[in-house]
Image (spheres, rainbow, N blue to C red):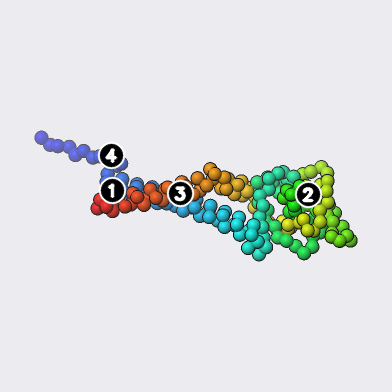
Amino acid sequence: MGGSETRLPFWHSHYEIHHTMKTLKFIFNLISYLLLGAFGLVIIFTVASNQGVLGGYRSFVVQSGSMEPTIMTGDIVLIQSQSQYMKNDVVTFKNEEGRIVTHRILKADLSKTPQVFTTKGDANAVEDANTITQDSILGKVQFVAPKLGYFVSYARSPMGVVIFIVVPALILILSEVISLFKHARS
């Protein structure tokens, strides 16, 4: 009797399984390295910018809509200290309650020592209740990174640490354990 040849579906082929595993390993490793790299950049950028290492630049996550539409909630502002501040400069300062605020200078009274500034959020109907002095200004806004603050805030949260550190680390460890078992079997 003539026998008929039976072929296994492609997913049963040793070559296909090996090729699929190699591809999955590559994808998992790539994702792990990208997540670890992104988290590493967030940490480096945050530490460096808030320690004044980056040429005196500092960064802050905007947490309210008082400057919309110029600066939106969730944006990151990059500020740098200036020797002088003028009307219409957008500045970040520490208010009387100790909160960090980013608002626009409406009026600058340069005749007084120390200089006195009246500020207001672009979205606010009225100017800020208290004036500020140059000593309370941390810096002038030099750059706005739209919505990046949401990522930074999430990356700093416990769940963000799990997603950006623990998960990639586990994927890398699992990948290495699989590689060790494969080499031990051959």
Reading the image, the residue beneath label 1 is: 15
Pointer 1 and pointer 4: residues touching (CB < 8 Å)? Answer: no
Residue at far left of view: 1
Please report the residue visible at 83 percent of the width from the left and 51 percent of the height from the top: 131
* Cα distance in 3D space between marks 4 and 2: 73 Å
Quadrant in the picture for residue 41: bottom right
Among numbered discs 2 and 1, the one appearing first in the sequence = 1
- The N terminus - image quarter: top left
Please report the residue visible at 59 percent of the width from the left and 49 percent of the height from the top: 152
Query: Which one is nearer the viewer's eye here, 31 or 110?
Result: 110
Reading the image, the residue beneath label 3 is: 168
Dot 3 surroundings within 10 Å: few (below 14), some, or many (20 or more)? many
Q: Is residue 30 left or right of residue 186?
A: right
Mark 1 or mark 3: which is in front? 3
Reading the image, the residue beneath label 2 is: 96
Query: Which secondary structure, mark 4?
Result: loop
In the rendered image, residue 81, in percent from the top left (x then y), is placed at 73, 61
Among numbered discs 1 and 4, the one appearing first in the sequence = 4
Mark 4 or mark 2: which is in front? 2
